[in-house]
Image (cartoon, helix red, strand yellow):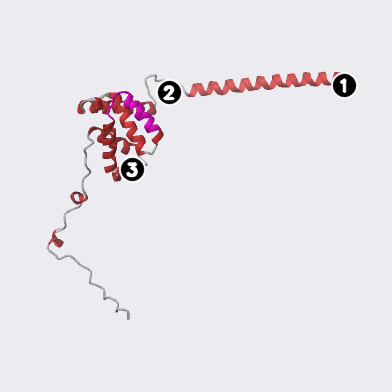
Amino acid sequence: MGVYFQSGTKRFMSTRRLLGAVCVLAFSLTAGTAFAQGSGNGSPNEKPPAADKAAKDSQKKIDEIAEASQVLTGAAGNPECVWLGRRVVSLLWRDDLDTAFRHLDLYERFGCPAGHVQATFRCLTKFADQIDDKVQKSLDDRVHACWINPQAQPQTAAAAAPAPSPSTAGAAPITPSPSPSPPAAK
């Protein structure tokens, strides 16, 4: 019985070595082809589209912070206050209150005015119908506009309504005729 066990162990060990060698060979072949595919078409200066988009987004954020720094006076225009404050307002809008309050603590620790966050959020609520929840850019753009000018007001419905057409301008308005009243109960 001991001889059979030893020969079975040797077969198991040689099978195990063979399986390990096959795995190493398969891994080296797939890793080599993946590395070759990732090298691009040979032009080292070509950037992938995702990196180009990220660079544009980053530059846009830098420009927005610089614009806010030029327009706003005081601490609300400091770059750290602009970045954190806009983030707090966005988080409040998306109902992520725990994260918003943690950011608000950090915002206040930098010496930024908490009243500006309140005024910006108040402005944002006035423009609620213009914000599309499915498009992040609409929220970001509105938060930026409200951060720069918290007293901004949306256009009223009367100003946005078109003027009556000339053909109906002089006509009397149509009023519904009164319905007959039911007879009095006895």
Give how far across and how far down residue 183 sits, in percent: 29, 79
Query: Can see residue 56?
Result: no
Task: Using a 10 Å C-alpha cutoff, classify the residue at mark 1 as few (fewer than 14 neighbours), some (14 to 19) or many (20 or more).
Answer: few
Outermost residue on the front side: it is: 186
Which is nearer the eye, 67 or 32? 67
Instruction: State the mark number for residue 132.
Output: 3
Q: Residues within 10 Å of mark 2 (few under 14, many from 20)?
A: few
Q: Nearer the viewer, mark 1 or mark 2?
A: 1
Q: CA distance from mark 3 to mark 1?
A: 77 Å
Q: Quadrant of residue 60?
A: top left
Question: In the orientation shown, which residue stands out farthest toward the right?
Answer: 1
Amino acid under label 3? Asp
Q: In the picture provided, is 11 more to the left or to the right than 75? A: right
The structure residue drawn at horizontal position 26% and vertical position 73%, both measured from the top left corner, is 179
Q: Which residue is mark 2?
A: 41
Magenta range: 99-113
Point out the frontmost of discs 3 and 1.
3
Do the numbered discs 3 and 1 sit on residues whose CB atoms are within 8 Å?
A: no
Distance Cα–Cα, label 3 vs label 2: 40 Å
Residue 180 position, x and y percent, is: 26, 76
Q: Which comes sooner in the sequence, label 3 or label 1?
A: 1
